[in-house]
Image (tube, helix red, strand yellow):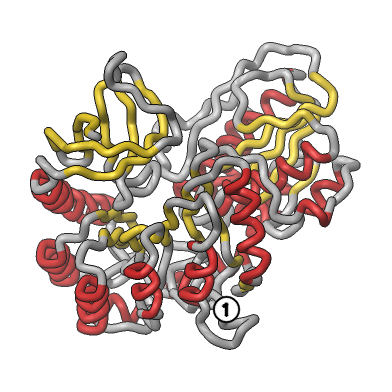
Amino acid sequence: MNFNIVNMYVLRIKYKYKPDTNVNCIFVKLVIFSMKTKTQKKNKVNVVTLGCSKNIVDSEILMGQLKANNFNVEHESENDDHQIVIINTCGFVENAKQESIDTILRYVDAKKEGSIEKLYVAGCLSERYKSDLEKEIPEVDAYFGTRELPKILKTLKADYKKELVGERLLTTPVHYAYFKISEGCDRPCSFCAIPLMRGGHISEPIESLVNRAKSLSAKGTRELLLIAQDLTYYGLDIYKKRELATLIDKLSDVEGIDWIRLHYAFPSGFPMEVLDVMNQKSNVCNYLDMPLQHISDNMLKSMRRGITKQKTIDTVNQIRDKVPNIAIRTTLISGYPGETQQDHEEMLQWVEQSKFERLGIFTYSHEENTHAFNLKDDVKEKVKKDRADAVMKLQQEISYNLNQQKIGNTYKVLFDRKENDYFVGRTEFDSPDVDNEVLVKATEQNYVRIGDFANVRITEASDFDLYGVFVD
């Protein structure tokens, strides 16, 4: 981005700042707060998390350390009585970077108004553009990278408590938790800036992860959502072989963990023995999040994905053959440099044939210092969006048809919340925030505790929601 975004937003704040209300980034929850000046409560910290589930885990670990140091810590509080605000930023794609800058400047304004005393910025944007940020937004008290937790704590005059490594203050409902098994990435994907911000792949030892799972279970967590930049690389650095299957097997034996869900598995070199564990262990969900990005051989080669169209199709078919009841979530990119109309139509045809249970798509973001940045960003933004919309329109039809087939079936559902007149939950085929939800009318006769499982018979279905009734 050559930091044009920062310059643009800095001009806004220096010369009658107005927030950009047109930004709509799926990664980000906008934080709204009052600008009225109040007396800050000492040692009260508001942690604001932007971006992906890996950032959520980082924020939760930071909050756990702060609490152990007797800080009064909250997550994305709407009140303005905090002495300190720490923003954990996202720097993945253009919209996410814009939203991170926008949020920083909102709190810079709050600091100028006297609503907060100290403002710190951490995370991916800070890792990637620290020197530029320090120059353009000096009102921030300090910037920290993605692996500088001890430095943040030292700045706050807090001790880094090694005995608390892995301990977290959950920002999710207690019954499920994102569970990061590794950091960074060694993949050479041309479009991705993650290695620039997160560094190379580092696996967490199995014993450590099992202990963390036991700790979460003891506090009421029933579902672990395994996350990493690439789950399939797990173990290659410390065990010299892929050990994802072994890890999942060990985690599945942790008492109290009812569901284990797999996110972000690279298709090239996918360890098929993982599917054997999925079949053998009832608490490993028949669910796999595998971002495939594209299907055209031209695009896959330029993206440096290390896989061909036919190998991609064969891999998906093999997964479905081994686990016939599996739900596969995938993610695609539209408008990558050089993508032709023929490439796009090839993607559409493949999506129609594959009938993925879950699918999302992003428009390509031209990220500096990535391999693809050397290519001409030659697909117009409108074309990128139109192509993405066409894919999602097709997926909407696929999702509707698949959901219609669920009517009359009974599923085990984990309930996440009560919203208006409905209890809202998920099946094993659905991850929080991104997948289908199951809604059951809440009445005195129809009652379930949040965080509990219940059997639900599906009575109606829409594109992305299921409706049902409790059954014994």
Q: Amino acid at mark 1?
A: Gly
Residue found at x 38% / y 42%: 433
Q: Position of residue 444 (x, y in %)?
A: 31, 14
Q: Residues within 10 Å of mark 1 (few under 14, many from 20)?
A: many
Image height of 428 relative to 73, above or below: below
Image height of 232 relative to 421, above or below: below
Q: Position of residue 110 (x, y in %)?
A: 69, 23
Q: Is residue 97 visible?
A: no
Residue found at x 35% / y 65%: 291
Q: Is residue 236 visible?
A: yes
Image height of 239 relative to 18, above or below: below
Q: Position of residue 212 (x, y in %)?
A: 64, 56
Farthest residue to the front: give it: 472
Q: Is residue 463 left or right of residue 427?
A: left
Q: Nearer the viewer, residue 129 or 267?
A: 267
Q: Is residue 403 left or right of residue 205?
A: left
Q: Nearer the viewer, residue 268 or 129?
A: 268
Instruction: Please give the residue where the numbered disc 1 appears in the rendered image.
Output: 235
Place residue 391 in its image quadrant: bottom left
Q: Position of residue 34 (x, y in %)?
A: 61, 16
Image height of 439 relative to 209, above or below: above
Residue found at x 83% / y 28%: 43
